[in-house]
Amino acid sequence: MTALSILDLVRVTEETDARGAFDNARDLAAHAEHWGYNRIWVAEHHNMPGIASAATSLVLAHIAAGSSRIRVGAGGIMLPNHSPYVIAEQFGTLARLFPGRVDLGLGRAPGTDQTTLRALRRTNESAENFPQDVLELQAFLAPAVPGQRIQAVPAAGTEVPLWILGSSNFGAMLAAELGLPYAFASHFAPEMLLSALDIYRSRFKPSEQLARPYTMVGVNVIAAPTDAEARRLATTQQMSFADIFRGARGLSRPPIDDIESYWSPMEKAQAMRMLARSIVGSPETVRAGLRALVAETGADELIVVSDVFDHAKRLRSFELIAEAAGLDAAPTASLPDTRVPDANLASAT
């Protein structure tokens, strides 16, 4: 059985606020470990009102504290935005707080626009140092050696597992060269998926962290009792993509009955190209789609985005996806709601 994980966008919606988004992510993790998901990741984005995970390590601490087994991690940290030393400190701290549960996925893109990049005191040229920064970060997470003058405290010796994330052949080549697991962002950039996986597997060099290639494939999956209901829920994500092309990155919107009335033909073409590998439908449709994707890619693991507006329906989507994938649910009692009462300030006003 192929492992299944979650990439949570920590969405701020028109009916909640950032605190509500944090608590919804925490609640999802508590349910996801019961349903059999392997890990839950969140990603670094800046200057996006609809995504609340900019301070990624802090969000991960909140999520991890509301669960007990599921792995938590960054999918990813955009390393050119940061000093490797600081990221080592942050994720080493997470590893001390939640031993054996923390992953660190690393991306080369800025994860934001040029104006915000300047606010971060970074430039496009910072990305040119990405391979060296990965090695520096890895060294700070390794056990300290005698005479080492600079240590990342308390990170030294935690050896947090690193992943390389990518949407092109560059990340595949780097992950192969360093002997690290590779995650491809086919949930928004599917065009180079197969070529990148082939490059990674053919060039892989074993390392202390990983003896053989390990691939994870990103995929949008929205499940509901019927195909029609799932397609309606998917309009939330489709509107978000149309808004990106308009330069209007706002809050997550509730689904609509007719997406054709929302986007232009050009916006539709652009969005559908980015969402080409999405799986949307009933449990039977999702089961067939997941099997086909694994057969085509040979992925060791799938990481799922289920961008559904309503939290309860999003939970139901992930539950149906787990059932369709044949995950083994943990035999536990009904789960408590781990969200903080009255935290949803936006909907209370």
Image (spheres, helix red, strand yellow):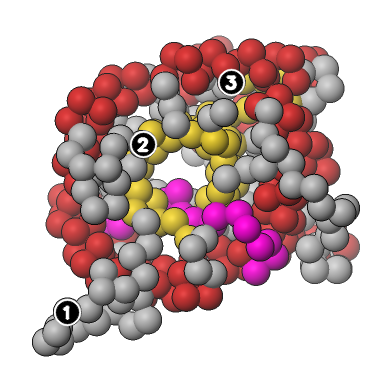
Q: Which mark is residue 260?
A: none
Which residue occupies the foreground of this view, 282 or 264? 282
List x then y, in percent, for residue 231: 73, 19
List x then y, in percent, for residue 202: 20, 25
Separation (CA) of disc 3 from disc 1: 45 Å
Horizontal relation, residue 158 to residue 283: left or right: left
Q: Three-letter amino acid code at disc 1?
A: Val
Confirm whether the magenta stretch covers residue 67: yes
Q: Which mark is residue 290?
A: 3
Q: Mark 2 falls on what kind of element? A: loop
Whether 86 is drawn above or below 309: the answer is: below
Q: Three-letter amino acid code at disc 2?
A: Tyr
Residue matched to label 2:
214
Q: Which residues are magenta?
A: 65-80
List x then y, in percent, for residue 161: 37, 56
Q: Three-letter amino acid code at disc 3?
A: Leu
At 41% from the left edge and 68% from the top edge, which residue is drawn?
91
